[in-house]
Image (tube, rainbow, N blue to C red):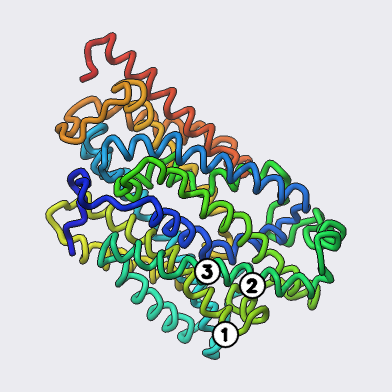
């Protein structure tokens, strides 16, 4: 159960066919976040053209980043992000990174447990959180979250095989569920064909003022958010831990299933549900995936929301468990992941992250993505594409990695504090980090310091 190749390259006998990765990405990205993000686009006052075009192009850039950056490195090294980073940058750097990484992963997984709890809240009479909620809404909410968190954690702790199995089982159900929600919502918005949709799209996504507490979204907000909402996975290389199991590099295209079925179709479908709610009662601005889906397709909608949260939280808890396990390689990965699940469950009791998901996801990507630039420069430029999975961890000159990462974040923190949307800063942070590291490495090499 604990032999998940956390410290060694994945052997050919343990590598999977490309098809399972299409299912894995479709299940993970047609998931709990979609039930939150779709409605939040309307809350941000986005216009129809800005939304549809921004989603199309942003998802394309995300897929190309997975295929062009993450997959080649995963295929050459066959290591987790954490093991490869230990070889390249040293164990102390990995310790700092893993702590930040695990905390942010826990917060994201916690938001997905929150999403699933809103489905249970339709059946069990518990107070539900509002759009501006921060604190747990009561003992009933805490109990429901605790049960869901324990269930999600169990499958993540068992290991990669069960993470993949859950995705394979659930992906078809989720895709049908999201599609059904969207199709049911359309007639309630007076849309009965493509002509009606084109005519009424501006009434669904009005392009007007955002709801209180939300920022105004334009095309560029949608484009960069869509490209960078998973920046920690592709630009930041976290999906080395998943794609290292791929038998063929063609698995690098598999995220397209998640992007266009999840981050396009599912976001739009969830957005339509929220539009129906606002049309029925403009004062009802709470974003609660459970009631939204239940009002559309009944009990099937509740199951869809629970499973959607599960398929996102599962691999996220798994990744966080790998991050912490890398700090104590001799420990039980199962027990470490179980401990991570406990932290996730506690975070999930506070609905603030789920309700501010657009802001959190942007910040999350901006912080973690630049570390992937260090691996990209090391692999493609310094090593010229030649992997060294058996190399000893770096013992000196780790200062270059700290300086590049923290330097890039410090520079990007200036516009962030002035109110610039975090997703606008993810790609600049990645480029800055890579450029700083390359310059510092060249400087150290000239000084005779770099090894």
Specify few, some or many for label 2: CA neighbours under 10 Å numbering under 14, 14-19, or 20 or more: some
Task: Name the side, left or right, on which 390 lies relative to 53.
Answer: left
Task: Name the side, left or right, on which 330 lies relative to 67.
Answer: left
Looking at the image, is mark 1 or mark 3 earlier in the sequence? 3
Residue occupying the far top of the picture? 446
x then y, percent, for residue 265: 63, 59
- The CA span between labels 2 and 3 is 10 Å
- The CA span between labels 2 and 1 is 13 Å
What residue is shown with label 1? 299
Picture quarter with the C terminus: top left
Task: Name the side, left or right, on which 338 lies relative to 23.
Answer: left
What residue is shown with label 3? 174
- The CA span between labels 1 and 3 is 14 Å
At horizontal 45% and vertical 54% (from top left) the residue drawn is 22
From this view, report whether residue 42 is shown above or below residue 15. below
x then y, percent, for residue 150: 34, 76
What residue is shown with label 2? 180
- Asked whether 100 or 177 is in front, the reply is 177
């Amino acid at each position: 159960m604990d032999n998940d190749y956390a410290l060694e390259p994945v052997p050919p006998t343990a590598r999977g066919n490309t098809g399972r990765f299409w299912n894995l990405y479709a299940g993970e990205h047609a998931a709990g976040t979609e039930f939150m993000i779709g409605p939040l686009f309307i809350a941000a006052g986005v216009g129809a053209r800005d939304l549809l075009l921004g989603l199309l192009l942003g998802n394309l850039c995300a897929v190309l980043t997975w295929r062009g950056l993450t997959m080649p490195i995963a295929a050459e090294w066959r290591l987790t992000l954490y093991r490869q980073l230990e070889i390249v940058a040293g164990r102390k750097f990995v310790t700092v990174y893993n702590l930040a990484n695990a905390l942010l992963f826990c917060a994201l997984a916690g938001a997905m447990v929150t999403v699933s709890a809103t489905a249970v809240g339709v059946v069990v009479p518990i107070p539900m959180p509002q759009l501006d909620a921060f604190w747990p809404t009561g003992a009933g909410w805490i109990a429901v979250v605790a049960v869901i968190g324990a269930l999600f954690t169990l499958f993540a702790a068992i290991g990669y095989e069960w993470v993949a199995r859950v995705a394979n089982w659930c992906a078809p159900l989720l895709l049908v569920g999201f599609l059904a929600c969207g199709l049911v919502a359309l007639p309630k918005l007076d849309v009965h064909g493509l002509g009606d949709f084109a005519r009424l799209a501006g009434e669904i996504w009005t392009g007007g003022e955002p709801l209180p507490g939300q920022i105004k979204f334009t095309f560029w907000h949608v484009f960069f958010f869509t490209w960078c909402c998973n920046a920690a996975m592709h630009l930041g290389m976290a999906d080395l831990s998943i794609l290292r199991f791929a038998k063929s590099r063609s698995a690098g295209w598999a995220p397209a299933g998640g992007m266009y079925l999840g981050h396009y179709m599912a976001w739009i479908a969830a957005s339509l549900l929220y539009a129906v709610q606002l049309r029925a009662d403009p004062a009802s601005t709470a974003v609660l995936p459970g009631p939204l889906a239940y009002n559309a397709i009944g009990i099937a909608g509740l199951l869809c929301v629970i499973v959607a949260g599960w398929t996102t939280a599962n691999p996220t808890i798994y990744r966080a468990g790998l991050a912490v396990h890398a700090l104590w390689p001799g420990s039980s990965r199962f027990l470490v992941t179980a401990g991570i699940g406990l932290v996730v469950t506690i975070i999930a009791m506070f609905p603030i992250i789920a309700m501010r998901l657009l802001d959190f996801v942007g910040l999350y990507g901006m912080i973690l993505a630049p570390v992937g630039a260090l691996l990209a420069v090391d692999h493609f430029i310094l090593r010229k594409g030649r992997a060294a999975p058996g190399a000893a961890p770096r013992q000196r000159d780790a200062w270059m990695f700290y300086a590049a990462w923290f330097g890039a974040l410090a520079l990007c923190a200036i516009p962030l504090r002035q109110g610039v949307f975090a997703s606008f800063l993810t790609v600049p942070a990645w480029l800055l980090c890579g450029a700083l590291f390359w310059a510092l490495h060249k400087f150290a090499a000239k000084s005779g310091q770099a090894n």
